[in-house]
Every structure is written in structure tokens, then in C-alpha cells.
């Protein structure tokens, strides 16, 4: 994949002397910079080459915003350590709802540790999955910000926690110092067919590059996860997803894969005109979609079912045991594709925990009890909300 270029750095005056800021400037010694009292604003395309360093005023660690009453979630926790992404996926939700499109990183990242300590201490028996990559690609800016390198040493000390970095890049050499001694780090790739990558995931690594990155992660002894999300309907999609999954399992050992998610293309209706304007040729605006129960545009259910079933069966033909789940799907889809459905989101959380406990005994995880997971608060945990 091509090098990510930063054309200008804006620094919030309040953070200009912080060590985080100085480190970024060391990594970008020749990039023009400006000290500012107001957040810069640029168009989506321009903003992808502008870096802004400031303090984050909200809460870094939150329940995954994918939660909707109508669909099963999984109680995943996200860290918004960066907002804005230099990659350019046609379906990216950030195009529609970010106030400003500049790449924003936060000098007060250490607040993440306080927030997570509070959450973690509250649940000593719980197996927690948390990760970056919700409002950005986890690794696309790593070379400049080193933020993952700052977070890994903290999370690797946390018991019963899986820390996930999600990417569509192949830049993982910075992880070499953590190789073979970080057993709760999960390197995660969003995967798609080469045809979908070429037509909708611009500026990202090719499938071959992503798989090479995964191979390297395996050599370094990390666990891995993969997200077929969004699954995109396109010509010959059956054959293309089949081949992609075959290549995945030829490249990595399925015993090192902690989980695989499946999610269909979905978007808020007001994103469609933005996509049309920015990517008039993209096939994803031509397919027929309906407004679903969560007010998002989705493929019709029979098509979703057909795609999920095909991909799920292909994965299962390679691994009977890897944990596969749907990101934000209804119980009916679970039932039809997998032959069972969790009763609620806490049940999905329990199934994750049960699989991790059983498949990775060397981690000494607490044995998950169904009743305990059912008794947990809603994922909108008051421990986070209180600190906003
Ligand atoms: S990698 Fe993720 S955050 Fe970045 S443009 Fe693509 S969808 Fe958006």
C-alpha cells in the first residue's frame, strides 16, 4: 500500500509542550506546523492529510456504539484514541457524522488508563474484549503517533483482557518488541474479496498485503481476528468470498484466530448522497437496500442470509472451532445460519468468554458462568457514563 502523507500538523496550544506532541513532531520533522486555538476544519478529502493534536474532552473508553435494541450486539468495548482515518473506504461512516474530517490524535491519552482501570476493577470475573479502530484504522497512523505502542504495554498487564487492534493496512513491524511476550494482544484484519477491496476500500492494503501482515503477526506469536465486515454484494461474490476464505486459512493457523465476525454492508440513509458525490462509480450505491429496524440501509434479508450462510459454511469447512459471530444481526439470521440464536447481548458476551476460556487454557482465564454474564449491567455501563 502507498505511504500515508501528512501535509500539515495543527497543534492545540494547550498541548504543544506535551511529550506525546513532541514525539509526533519527531516522527514528522519536515511537515509544516501551526499552533492554534481552534480546531481546523477541512473537507473530507483534504482532512485525510491533516493531523491535529489536542486533548480529548470526552470519555475515551465506551461500549461499542453499534448497540441497538433490535439487533444482537456483543458487549465489545471501544477506545477512541484517534478520530479520522487517512484510508478512504467508500462506505465509511465517518464521512457522514464527523464534525471535522481532520485526523485528530489526543495528547491526554493516559486518561484511557484511568478509565479502563475503573471498568476492569469492577469486573474481576469477566473476560473483556476491548480495542481501538472504531473511529479510525488502528494502525494507519502508528508510524507518526505511536499510540498503539503506548497502549500495548498497559493492556498486556491486564488479566482477562483481550486488546484488539483493527486494521486494513500491513504495517506491523513496530510490534516486533512485543513479539512472543504479549499473549492478550489481538491483531485484527478487516477482510474482503480483492474485487471489493479494489472497488470500495481505497488507499488500503490489498488482500495479499493484509494476509502477509497476518502471516507476520502469527510469526511474532500474536493472536489474530478477522472481520468480514462489511460483506459487499458484487458480481461473482460467492466464488470470490470462497477463494478469499481459502487464502486466509492457507495463510494462518486457525488455532491462533480468536474470533471472526460477519457483518453485512449497512449505512445510515443520509450517508448515501455523500457516497454518491464522493464515489459516483462505486457499485455499493446501486444495489437495492431497505431501511431496517435500526434505521440503517441494509441488503434485503434473503440476500443477507444467502451471503452469511455461504461465508459461514466456508469458514466452518476450514475450522469447526473458531468463534464466529454476527456484528449487529437479528436472532433470525443467527438461527437460520448457525442453527441457534443467543437469547440476548449478554449471552453473546458469554459465548465469546466460553470459547476463549476453552480454546486458550494457557491464559488462565476465569471459567465463565452463564448466570454471571446474564447479571451484568447493560453495556451502557454507568462506570463510564458517570465520568462524562
Ligand atoms: S479503514 Fe475504517 S475508518 Fe478508515 S476509511 Fe475505512 S472504514 Fe473508515
Image (tube, helix red, strand yellow):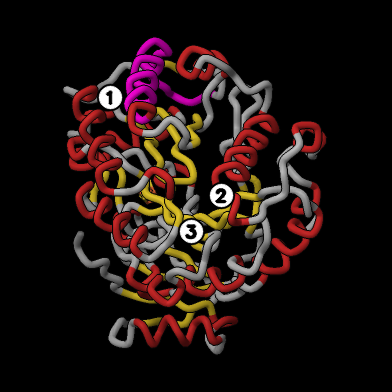
Q: Is mark 1 within 8 Å of ligand 1?
A: no
The crowding category of the residue bearing disc 3, from other C-alpha atoms within 10 Å (few below 14, some 14 to 19, many at least 20), is many
Q: Position of residue 216 (x, y in %)?
A: 30, 61
Indicate whether 186 appears above or below 267: below
User: Residue 279 is drawn in which quadrant?
Assistant: top left
Q: Nearer the viewer, mark 3 or mark 1?
A: 1
**Residue, x 48% and y 33% (percent of image)?**
324
User: Residue 313 is drawn in which quadrant?
Assistant: top left
Of 15 and 237, which appears nearest the observer?
A: 237
In the picture of the structure, the residue carrying the numbered disc 2 is: 360
Which numbered disc flags the more N-terminal residue, 2 or 1? 1
Indicate whether 145 appears above or below 222: below
Of 181 and 48, which appears nearest the observer?
A: 181
For marks 3 and 1, give the CA distance: 28 Å
Q: Nearer the viewer, mark 2 or mark 1?
A: 2
Apparent side of residue 27 relative to residue 118 in the rendered image (left or right): left
The crowding category of the residue bearing disc 1, from other C-alpha atoms within 10 Å (few below 14, some 14 to 19, many at least 20), is some
Apparent side of residue 290 relative to residue 282 in the rendered image (left or right): right
**Residue, x 34% and y 27% (percent of image)?**
317
Residue 83's disc is 3
Residue 233's disc is 1
Q: Nearer the viewer, mark 3 or mark 2?
A: 2
Residue 306 colored in magenta in the image: yes
Badges 3 and 1: C-beta atoms under 8 Å apart?
no
Q: Position of residue 60 (x, y in %)?
A: 63, 59
Q: Which region shows up in magenta? A: 295-315
Which numbered disc flags the more N-terminal residue, 3 or 1? 3
Amino acid at each position: 500500500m502507498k505511504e500515508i502523507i501528512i501535509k500539515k500538523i495543527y497543534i492545540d496550544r494547550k498541548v504543544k509542550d506535551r511529550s506525546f506532541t513532541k514525539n509526533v513532531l519527531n516522527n514528522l520533522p519536515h511537515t509544516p506546523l501551526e499552533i492554534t486555538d481552534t480546531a481546523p476544519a477541512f473537507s473530507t478529502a483534504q482532512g485525510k492529510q491533516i493531523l491535529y493534536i489536542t486533548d480529548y474532552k470526552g470519555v475515551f473508553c465506551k461500549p461499542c456504539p453499534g448497540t441497538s435494541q433490535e439487533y444482537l450486539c456483543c458487549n465489545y468495548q471501544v477506545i477512541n484514541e484517534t478520530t479520522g482515518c487517512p484510508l478512504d473506504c467508500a462506505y465509511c461512516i465517518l464521512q457522514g457524522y464527523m464534525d471535522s474530517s481532520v485526523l485528530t490524535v489526543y495528547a491526554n491519552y493516559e486518561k484511557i488508563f484511568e478509565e479502563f482501570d475503573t471498568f476492569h476493577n469492577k469486573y474481576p470475573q469477566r473476560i473483556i474484549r476491548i480495542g481501538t479502530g472504531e473511529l479510525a484504522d488502528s494502525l494507519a497512523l502508528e508510524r507518526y503517533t505511536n499510540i498503539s505502542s503506548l497502549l500495548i504495554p498497559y493492556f498486556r498487564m491486564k488479566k482477562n483482557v483481550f486488546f484488539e487492534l483493527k486494521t486494513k493496512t500491513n504495517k506491523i513491524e513496530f510490534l516486533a518488541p512485543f513479539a512472543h511476550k504479549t499473549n492478550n494482544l489481538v491483531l485484527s484484519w478487516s477482510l474482503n474479496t480483492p474485487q471489493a477491496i479494489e472497488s470500495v476500500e481505497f488507499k488500503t492494503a490489498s488482500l495479499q498485503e493484509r494476509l502477509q501482515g497476518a502471516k507476520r503477526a502469527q510469526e511474532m506469536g500474536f493472536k489474530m481476528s478477522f472481520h468480514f465486515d462489511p460483506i459487499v454484494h458484487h458480481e461473482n461474490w460467492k466464488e470470490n468470498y470462497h477463494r478469499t476464505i481459502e487464502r486466509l486459512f492457507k495463510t494462518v493457523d486457525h488455532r491462533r484466530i480468536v474470533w471472526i465476525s460477519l457483518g453485512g454492508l449497512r449505512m445510515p440513509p443520509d450517508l448515501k448522497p455523500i457516497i454518491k458525490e464522493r464515489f459516483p462509480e462505486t457499485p455499493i450505491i446501486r444495489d437495492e437496500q431497505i431501511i431496517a429496524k435500526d434505521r440503517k440501509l441494509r441488503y434485503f434479508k434473503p440476500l443477507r442470509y444467502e451471503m452469511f450462510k455461504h461465508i459461514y459454511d466456508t469458514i466452518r469447512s476450514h475450522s469447526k472451532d473458531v468463534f464466529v459471530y454476527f456484528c449487529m444481526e437479528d436472532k433470525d439470521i443467527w438461527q437460520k445460519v448457525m442453527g441457534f440464536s443467543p437469547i440476548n447481548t449478554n449471552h453473546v458476551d458469554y459465548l465469546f468468554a466460553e470459547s476463549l476460556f476453552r480454546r486458550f487454557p494457557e491464559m488462565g482465564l476465569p471459567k465463565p458462568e452463564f448466570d454471571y454474564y446474564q447479571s451484568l449491567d447493560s453495556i451502557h455501563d454507568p462506570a463510564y457514563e458517570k465520568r462524562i
